[in-house]
Image (cartoon, grey):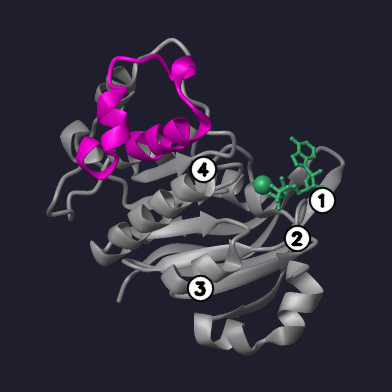
């Protein structure tokens, strides 16, 4: 088994504020890892470090065996990391189809079934219907499907979703979970943040809980289902 993402002794923050402290995390190739923790605990900050949007103060990040410390975000993206960002960030003035063609690439030479616009439309038929609509004419659910499709057509080695189903109607959430389940079965490596822990437990191989910028627990779904103290202390459930 190879390691797709290895984070070691990571410290990071913004200007005068320190957010992440001594974070270790490992994600094996072909697995799904969930990053759990309440609001403001540092999940998005950790993701920003992986994407190269902020520079760690200490520690290292290896992506598919290569240290990416000091790399700019575009280089990290070309190395095969794609993000479905918090708030989706679709381009208001590009159509659905333009998003999917503009981002089309193959950043994972090992992938056997390449993602393209047609495969995205097959997975999300709603997007096919909205093919010629602009980003700002889409509902929140359609925007999230587009953000996922836009990430997939780069054929990422590592797909990261920050708040996979936030603010979406239950029916759309189900579609997103079905999509993630399918990606997992196809061997896509995924790092996902979401607040629906029960759904994440059905999909993720491993869970990491962060509290005030520190990893406080990790384990598989079976262990998490039995760790009642973790739920009470760190997940607020
Ligand atoms: N751009 C920024 N500048 C300064 N502080 C920030 C910035 N972004 C986040 N923070 C602070 O860093 C801490 C961690 O925030 P982060 O967004 O990483 O948390 P999160 O776990 O993703 O939370 P949420 O569940 O609300 O998305 C918070 O205290 C937040 O206020
Ligand atoms: Mg966040």
Please say if the residues under marks 4 and 3 sit with CB atoms less than 8 Å apart.
no
- In space, the residues marked 3 and 1 are separated at their CA atoms by 30 Å
Q: What element carries label 2?
A: loop
The residue under label 1 is 18
Q: Is mark 1 in CB contact (under 8 Å) with mark 2?
A: yes
- What residue does disc 3 label? 201
Helix, strand, or loop for circle 1?
A: strand
Image quarter of the C terminus: bottom right
* Chief secondary structure of the magenta portion: helix
Q: Give the range drawn in magenta.
A: 121-150
Percent across and percent down for residue 165 are 53, 48
Separation of marks 4 and 3 at Cα, in angstroms: 25 Å
* Frontmost residue, 231 versus 220: 231
Mark 3: few/some/many CA within 10 Å (<14, 14-19, 20+):
some
Q: Is residue 157 above or below residue 22?
A: above
Q: Are marks 2 and 3 in contact (CB under 8 Å)?
A: no
**Residue of label 4:** 51
Disc 1 under 8 Å from ligand 1? The reply is no
**Residue 136, position as x, y percentages in the image:** 49, 16
- Left or right: residue 80 compared with residue 18: left
């Amino acid at each position: 088994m190879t390691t797709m993402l290895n984070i070691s002794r990571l410290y990071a923050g913004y200007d005068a504020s320190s957010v992440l402290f001594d974070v270790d995390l490992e994600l094996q190739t072909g697995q799904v890892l969930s990053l759990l923790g309440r609001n403001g605990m540092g999940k998005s900050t950790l993701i920003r470090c992986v994407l190269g949007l902020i520079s760690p103060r200490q520690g290292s990040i290896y992506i598919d065996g290569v240290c990416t410390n000091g790399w700019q975000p575009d280089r990290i993206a070309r190395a095969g990391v794609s993000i479905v960002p918090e708030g989706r960030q679709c381009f208001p003035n590009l159509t659905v189809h333009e998003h999917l063609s503009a981002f089309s690439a193959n950043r994972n030479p090992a992938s056997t079934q390449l993602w393209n616009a047609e495969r995205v439309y097959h997975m999300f038929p709603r997007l096919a219907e909205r093919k010629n609509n602009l980003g700002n004419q889409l509902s929140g659910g359609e925007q999230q499907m587009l953000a996922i499709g836009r990430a997939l057509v780069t054929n990422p080695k590592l797909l990261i979703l920050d708040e996979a189903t936030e603010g979406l109607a239950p029916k759309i959430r189900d579609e997103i979970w079905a999509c993630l389940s399918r990606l997992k079965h196809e061997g896509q490596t995924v790092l996902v943040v979401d607040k629906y822990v029960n759904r994440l437990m059905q999909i993720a191989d491993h869970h990491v809980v962060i509290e005030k910028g520190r990893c406080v627990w990790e384990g598989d779904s079976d262990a998490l289902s039995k760790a009642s103290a973790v739920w009470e202390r760190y997940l607020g459930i």
